[in-house]
């Protein structure tokens, strides 16, 4: 995929872009948390806006989510990605989504796109699940999709009406 073709997908439109790991389970959350913990610079974990130590077990974050708002932020190049641990109250009941968001304004060239694609591949290889990048809350409209069978990320251009 060429940056010039996909660049309009990152034009600021007032919304974020979301990355979802589909059909995630508790073990997927844990392996993703463990991988992000090793990033440099290290992720920043906050609870209700106050910096806190990132728990070792994702279950502790989910427990905290019952009465507070935990969030983890980390860098890919100079892009900031956030995880709000949405839907964590449902993780015990089966499959759910792991979700990250980012500001499309920060994806400004092929180097940033390559970093984003690399992160999607990392998520997919760690979990062996489909990973999609979408407009904010647009899970039904993927922009990019990682397929664990092919281990590739492909652009899914919007169909003309």
Image: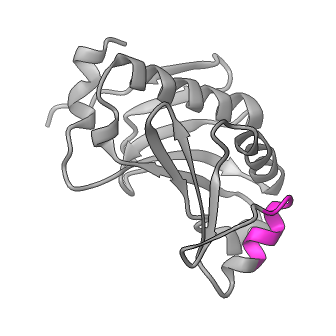
Vertical position of residue 84 compared to residue 130: above or below: below
> What residue lies at 61% left-to-right and 45% top-to-bottom?
21
Decide if residue 10 is on the left or right side of residue 141.
left
Q: What main secondary structure does the magenta stretch of the protein show?
A: helix
Vertical position of residue 122 compared to residue 18: above or below: above
Q: Residue furthest top?
A: 2
Q: Is residue 49 visible?
A: yes
Q: Residue furthest left?
A: 161
Color encoding of the figure: one colour
> What residue lies at 80% left-to-right and 45% top-to-bottom?
34
Over which residues does the magenta segment extend?
A: 55-63
Residue 158 in picture, x, y percent from top left: 26, 33
Decide if residue 9 is on the left or right side of residue 92.
left
Vertical position of residue 71 compared to residue 154: above or below: below
Q: Is residue 76 magenta?
A: no
Residue 12 in picture, x, y percent from top left: 20, 45
Decide if residue 79 is on the left or right side of residue 130.
left
Quadrant showing the N terminus: top left
90 or 126: nearer the viewer: 126
Vertical position of residue 80 compared to residue 64: above or below: above
Q: Is residue 93 visible?
A: no
């Amino acid at each position: 995929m060429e940056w010039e073709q996909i660049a309009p997908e990152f034009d600021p439109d007032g919304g974020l872009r979301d990355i979802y790991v589909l059909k995630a389970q508790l073990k997927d959350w844990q392996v993703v948390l463990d991988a992000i913990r090793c990033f440099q610079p290290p992720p920043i974990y906050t609870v209700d806006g106050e910096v806190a130590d990132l728990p070792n077990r994702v279950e502790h974050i989910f427990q905290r989510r019952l009465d507070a708002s935990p969030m983890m932020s980390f860098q890919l190049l100079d892009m900031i990605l956030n995880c709000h641990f949405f839907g964590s109250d449902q993780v015990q009941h089966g499959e759910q989504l792991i979700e990250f968001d980012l500001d499309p304004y920060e994806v400004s060239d092929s180097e940033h796109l390559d970093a984003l694609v690399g992160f999607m591949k990392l998520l997919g290889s760690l979990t062996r699940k489909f990973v999609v990048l979408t407009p904010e809350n647009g899970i039904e409209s993927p922009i990019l999709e990682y397929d664990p069978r092919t281990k590739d990320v492909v652009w899914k251009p919007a169909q003309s009406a």
